[in-house]
Amino acid sequence: PKEKIKIGETAARLLNDHDTLFLDSSSTCLCLAKAIDTHQKLNVLTNSFLIAQILAEYPEVTVEIVGGIYQPTNLSTYGHEAESNIAKRYAKYCFVTVNSVDQDYGFSNITETDIGVKRAFAQHAEKVIMLGNEAIARGVYEAGVKVSSAYPGTPSTEIREFLAMYSEVYV
């Protein structure tokens, strides 16, 4: 989707040579990987085989895959071993997509399979950058918006769905 491509391109502009990144296995992070300058010098740790395969073509990028339990549905790894591997590392940036963020509990997702990996990435990064509609919804929530309305079937529909996860916002 062109929106995810744009998000990936925008995120890629944040990167400088010699940055270390964590990229989760989301399709938006896949778009970010595709948008990285092929000659940029980066260190990347990911749990996505697809992202690793793309970045392996970039001569200046060092890419590492997190070990763990293999998830064939999105070609990624997860589990305690993956989280333990991440805990030994530190990155300047963590790029993730999640369904919601709670002030007390952190990230959550529709499926809990890889949420531990996302949380581990976030805990060991200087800056956590949420990509996608959930990031917009979180910003709206933190800005104090109490009511949201949108026309069904428009690009704002997904943002509104994420806003519905906050009980303080009437959608």
Image (spheres, grey):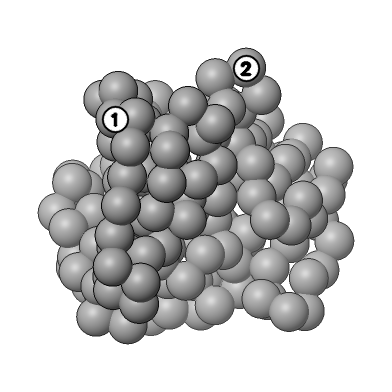
Is residue 145 visible in this depiction of the protein?
yes
Q: Is residue 65 left or right of residue 24?
A: right
Question: Label 1's element?
Answer: loop
- The crowding category of the residue bearing disc 2, from other C-alpha atoms within 10 Å (few below 14, some 14 to 19, many at least 20), is few
Q: Residue at x 39, y 25 (%)?
A: 126
Q: Is residue 6 left or right of residue 138?
A: left
The answer to which of 46 and 153 lies nearer the viewer is 153
The answer to which of 67 and 18 lies nearer the viewer is 67
User: Which residue has dot 2 on it?
Assistant: 104
Question: Label 2's element?
Answer: loop
User: Which residue has dot 1 on it?
Assistant: 145
Looking at the rendering, which quadrant does residue 92 occupy? top left
- The crowding category of the residue bearing disc 1, from other C-alpha atoms within 10 Å (few below 14, some 14 to 19, many at least 20), is some
42 above or below 56? above
The numbered mark at residue 82 is none
Q: Residue at x 83, y 49 (%)?
A: 79
Q: Position of residue 137 (x, y in %)?
A: 36, 44
Which amino acid lies under the numbered mark 2 shown in the image of this protein?
Answer: Asp
Q: Is residue 104 left or right of residue 139?
A: right
73 above or below 11? below
Is residue 78 visible in this depiction of the protein?
no
Looking at the rendering, which quadrant does residue 50 occupy? bottom right
Which amino acid lies under the numbered mark 1 shown in the image of this protein?
Answer: Val
